[in-house]
Image (cartoon, grey):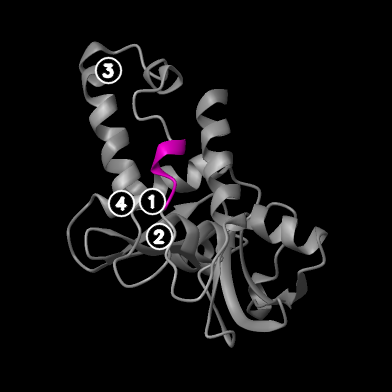
């Protein structure tokens, strides 16, 4: 799926680097994501799935990349790129790759993680609650998967999004040593935000259940 990844990265950087001027709205780059791309069609060999792929990609584009009516933003940008509100509050920004890139460019200052005494993170943990400043604005706590691919995160949040039509959906899951909630909030028919909420790590939830 290298072609799919290339399209995704192109959208990512287009969203991050696009110009914003007061009173001017810019379109979310639907055109950068080829809905009938050969690389997407090659992702499956099942005929019935092939027939649905183009439609599914259209739905995927709609709820991830459709610009909010009242905001110059979309769900993908909110979750994977991050935004500031009135220059005083960080909203969204739940992706570790963007975190790394912004820290590398000295736009972000990592302040540390937040964890309970029995949930101190180790090298096996893939979800963290983080505190950081971005462009001088503080985010007291933000959660994100660590070391996962954007494709994995898009897939898992898409599944939760499509589970029902409620404004907010929370699913409890156990992944490896961690117990977490996957939170997805809708903005109309589009994705408003999505993030993991770490509840416990180091298999603490499994030890508690065994007692």
Q: Are marks 1 and 4 in contact (CB under 8 Å)?
A: no
Between 1 and 173, the residue placed more toward the observer is 1
User: Which residue is identified by label 1?
Assistant: 65
Q: Are marks 4 and 2 in contact (CB under 8 Å)?
A: no
Secondary structure beneath dot 1 equals: helix
Task: Tell me the magenta residue range.
Answer: 28-32
Locate residue 111: give its quadrant.
bottom right
Picture residue at 57% right of the left edge, 73% below the top: 142
Q: Kindly report which numbered mark, 3 or 4, lies closer to the viewer in this rendering.
A: 4
Disc 4 versus disc 2: distance between alpha carbons? 9 Å
Q: Residues within 10 Å of mark 1 (few under 14, many from 20)?
A: many
Q: Residues within 10 Å of mark 3 (few under 14, many from 20)?
A: some
Q: Kindly report which numbered mark, 3 or 1, lies closer to the viewer in this rendering.
A: 1
User: Which residue is identified by label 4?
Assistant: 63
Secondary structure beneath dot 4 equals: helix
First in residue order: circle 3 vs circle 4: 3
Q: Residues within 10 Å of mark 4 (few under 14, many from 20)?
A: many
Picture residue at 23% right of the left edge, 69% below the top: 167
Main SS type for the magenta part?
Answer: helix
Count of picture labels: 4
């Amino acid at each position: 799926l290298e072609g799919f990844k290339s399209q995704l990265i192109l959208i990512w950087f287009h969203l991050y680097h696009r110009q914003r001027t007061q009173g001017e709205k810019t379109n979310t780059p639907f055109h950068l994501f080829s809905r009938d791309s050969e690389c997407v069609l090659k992702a499956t060999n099942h005929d019935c799935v092939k027939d649905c792929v183009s439609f599914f990609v259209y739905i995927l584009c709609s709820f991830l990349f459709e610009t909010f009516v009242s905001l110059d933003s979309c769900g993908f940008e909110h979750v994977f790129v991050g935004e500031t509100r009135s220059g005083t509050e960080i909203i969204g920004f739940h992706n570790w790759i963007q975190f790394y890139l912004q820290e590398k460019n000295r736009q972000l200052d990592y302040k540390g993680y937040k964890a309970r005494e029995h949930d101190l993170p180790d090298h096996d943990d893939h979800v963290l609650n983080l505190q950081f400043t971005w462009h001088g604005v503080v985010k007291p706590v933000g959660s994100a998967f660590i070391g996962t691919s954007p494709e994995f995160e898009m897939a898992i949040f898409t599944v939760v999004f499509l589970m029902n039509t409620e404004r907010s959906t929370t699913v409890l899951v156990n992944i490896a040593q961690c117990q977490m909630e996957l939170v997805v909030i809708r903005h109309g028919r589009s994705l408003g935000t999505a993030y993991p909420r770490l509840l416990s790590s180091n298999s603490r939830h499994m030890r508690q259940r065994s007692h």
